[in-house]
Image: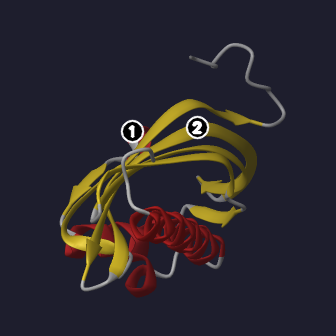
Amino acid sequence: MSGLTLEQRVSRLESAEDIRAMKARYCDLCDRGYEPTGLAALFTEDAVWDGAIFGRYEGREAIRAFFKGISGSLVFAAHLVMNPIITFVDDDTAHGKWRLWEPATVAENSSVDSRILLASYDDIYARVDGKWLHKSLTLHVNFFAPLHEGWAKSATQ
């Protein structure tokens, strides 16, 4: 933050905290059944949600539709995000990296299975009308393994 005024430095610290709180809201809404309208509101109109094995969705409405449908197959999830690294491009654009550890229950073929997801988020945030939103969210999956099988055979860097 060198080269910035004290006011700019404080503003970026406040913005970083706002982004952390927004990400926490995102995780909370995912963990409460993937509430589609609340989740979509955390994205810009032209945002991209790229979930790798979970698909890619462009625009707020497509993101909302995805979240509306995912709760039928991903019936339980606990999004545990950690290790945030938030950097600023400018006063209204930021980049975030997070790690995700997620125990989940997946419904498939009339049965349920316990799975564990290890991934990272690579996000771009934009401040729109004073509010920080996801401009893009990219999920990099290391593994999404059935708990009874483990992840040794499926883990990637």
Rendered residue at 52%/72% (across/down): 14
Question: Looking at the picture, does residue 121 appear above or below residue 125?
Answer: above
- Occupied quadrant, residue 126: bottom left
Mark closest to the chain's N terminus, 1 or 2: 1
Residue 98 visible in the snapshot: yes
Q: Give the quadrant of the C terminus.
A: top right
Residue 77: x and y in percent read 68, 62
**Display coloring:** secondary structure
Q: Is residue 39 left or right of residue 23?
A: left
**Considering depth in this image, is 119 or 65 the residue closer to the camera?**
119
For label 1, the SS is: helix
Give the residue pinned by disc 1: 52
Residue 64: x and y in percent read 32, 75
Mark 1 neighbour density, 10 Å: few (under 14) some (14–19) many (20 or more): few
Q: Residue 119 — which label?
A: 2
For label 2, the SS is: strand
Three-letter code, disc 2:
Ala
Residue reaching furthest top?
153
Mark 2 neighbour density, 10 Å: few (under 14) some (14–19) many (20 or more): many
Question: Looking at the picture, does residue 91 appear above or below residue 53?
Answer: below
**Which tag is nearer the camera, tag 1 or tag 2?**
2
Three-letter code, disc 1:
Ala
Rendered residue at 80%/37% (across/down): 147
**Considering depth in this image, is 109 or 33 the residue closer to the camera?**
33
